Amino acid sequence: MKKGLMAIVSLIAAVSIAGCGAAEQTASTPQTGGDANAKPKVYTTIYPLEYVAKRIGGDHVEVTNIIPIGVEPHDFEPTAKDMVALAGADIFAYNGSGLELWVDKAVGNLDKNKTVIVNASEGLELLKATEEHEHEHEHEGEAATEEHGHDHGEFDPHVWLDPTKLKAQAEKVKNTLVQKDQAHAADYEKNYAQLAADLDQLDQEFQNMAAQAAKKEFMTSHSAFSYLANRYGLEQVAISGLNPADEPSPAELKSLVEHVKEHNISYVLFESLVSPKVAEVIAKEAGVKTATLNPLEGLTEDDAKGGRDYLSIMRDNLETLKVALQ
């Protein structure tokens, strides 16, 4: 881990030590002491978790997403200020499954008597991380792995792109809010039930779209859509692996262009927080169009200003796939 993060860890440890004299509170009991009217402070690491925490918590909670708007989360590192603020959290919900490389040390220095820690993907059925196009480039061998490989863990972390898995993550957040703030438990249960119904409806809409699609294969900038593809019987062909910063070699670019032509792919899909240049090169060489498919790792400034959210962006994704799979 970088020196900056080590400094952050030291700082958060100092904050934790300073708080040792406070009255102890176990994670299994409701919040007590201090201002009885204070709202539980919920910190999240990615936009989908921020979205569900706000939907469930409503006016009863304060929700802060550590990763700023417009920032790609794969290589994000928190500042010392971020980590000091996190030390005051009542609930810390992170995605897990290898997405946030900085989380383990941060969690290790939080006061577990104050902060309930929620690994939102724990217990979910996860998909193995795979290197895209490795079957087409076995001849590149270890050199290709060294050039393009980045260790992001054993599993694909983009679980929220399957609405049923985001619903499971949301239930973990709801259960934790009920545990920490029993005075508003009925509201949390009600809000979760409405969110769950909305996610079930979205899931049904995607099922209908996929059932009517003439094609089942789509090409994306990076391998973020495996859970969506797996849920709806589609096939993702990704330009790069789990890290969108990885770029294909010239040989891989040529192979991708050939794949687009041979498989009659009409669109190359790129993402809102990632440079579209590689996708545009492939589309131009193959003579096809481009469009945006949003992995919802974070909102853009325009998304935030326009009041767009998980449901509206996922429905935009649905419309994009509907056209791309014609």
Image: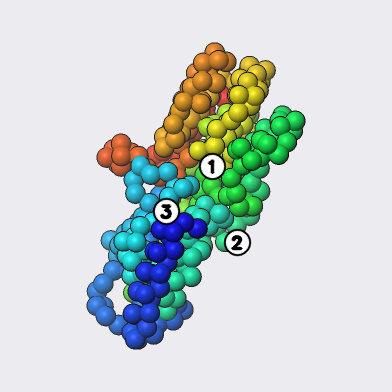
The type of residue carrying mark 2 is Gly
Mark 2: secondary structure: loop
Q: Is residue 92 visible?
A: no
- 76 over 217 or under it: above or below: below
Residue 268 falls left or right of residue 61:
right
**Which one is nearer the viewer's eye here, 239 or 139?**
139
Q: Percent from the top left, x then y, of residue 34? A: 27, 80
Contact (Cβ within 8 Å) of mark 2 with mark 3: no
Marks 3/1: CA–CA distance:
15 Å
Residue 82 falls left or right of residue 279:
left
Mark with earlier residue (3, 1): 3
Quarter assignment of residue 250: top right
Quarter assignment of residue 7: bottom left
Q: Percent from the top left, x then y, of residue 82? A: 34, 60
Q: Percent from the top left, x then y, of residue 201? A: 48, 44
Q: Percent from the top left, x then y, of residue 73? A: 44, 47
Mark number displayed over residue 123? 2
Q: Which residue is mark 3?
A: 77
Mark with earlier residue (2, 3): 3
Give me the residue at 54% from left, 47% from top: 158
For label 2, count other residues whose C-alpha is less than 10 Å away and answer few (under 14), some (14-19) or many (20+): few
Mark with earlier residue (1, 2): 2
**Which one is nearer the viewer's eye here, 106 or 54?**
106
The type of residue carrying mark 1 is Asn
